[in-house]
Amino acid sequence: MSSPLRTLSCALLAGALLVSASAEARFGKSSTSSDEASDSRTHDASAVGSSGTVHDASPVTEDSGSGGDVHDASPVEPYPPPQDYVDSSYTYVSPRRSRASWHENEFASRRHRNFTLGIEAQAMREGAGVGLHLGLEGDRFGVFARANALSLRAEDGSGVTEDISVTGLHLSMAVLKGRMGRVRLEGGLSIAKAADVTFIGPSVGLSSELYLVSSLALEARVQLTPWPYRQFDAAGGLAWYFGDSRLLALRGGMRMLVLNDAGYVDGVVHQDVLPGPYLSFGLAI
């Protein structure tokens, strides 16, 4: 599994580093004055077996004509099998092999993280952002939540900052998993709130982790919301697990966030392209 997992993780990381040209106007902000667009609108998307020797149960008879000698009437000799007898239906399992398999499973489970929690900071050319991420994951299924608050400079050059929040709630399923990492399919909802509008739409994604060594992993994710607004969120970087039992996680890399309101505010398409580095610190259990 490691070869396709490594290829897919690197492809996701490369896609996260692409930077597009910035749009002309801020996402979710009307081109008219703020007084004319004071009310916001919300758009919802819809046995082992062994053989033994057979003994005859017929009674022992005494032949009086042969001087009292005893004769066994059983047609099969009542002797036990030789010491080197081996039943062909028995399968031998080496204790050494069992111990090796157990240690491999223990090592794999020590790498896998069932609970992650962290705070995140991101620097962008248009401003900055802070976020929180939470993840609960079993052997195959999991749930992830991400929330980011962005503070961006206004497009008119007035120096005023504009706030945008982006939230994602995803269920996940590991389609590839093993000692080297895993690849997940994700699906759920995404929510984007801007000055004059709030969007709620379906979201799909793909995420992966590839362990380079036992305490260092390469991570990548891509998330897409096609309707009613458009959101593309891609990130890739490294995760370092350290501390006692490696319960602490430090993550860092590059993130690309693209927001497009599809003209729902005032008939004019407003788009923001927000690339930049991120740094995250938290727990990984």
Image (tube, grey):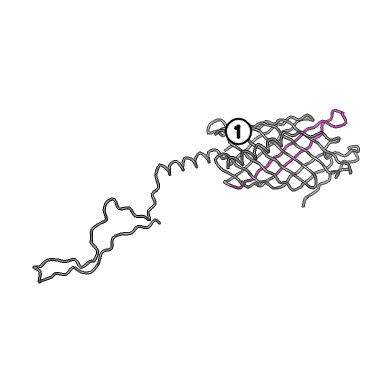
- Image check: 37 left or right of 193? right
Bounds of the magenta span? 140-168
Q: Quadrant of residue 136?
A: top right
What is the x, y in percent for residue 111?
55, 38
Q: Is residue 122 magenta?
A: no
> Quarter-wise, where is residue 184 in the image?
top right
Image x and y of residue 177, in percent: 58, 44
Identify the main secondary structure in magenta.
strand
Determine the residue positioned at 73% across, 31% down. Answer: 276
- Residue 150 on the magenta span: yes
Q: Nearer the viewer, residue 85 or 52?
A: 85
Q: Quadrant of the C terminus?
A: top right
Residue on which the image places disc 1: 249
Q: Residue furthest left?
A: 67
Q: Quadrant of the N terminus?
A: top right
User: Is 51 positioned to the left or the right of 114 in the image?
Assistant: left
Residue type at numbered disc 1: Ala
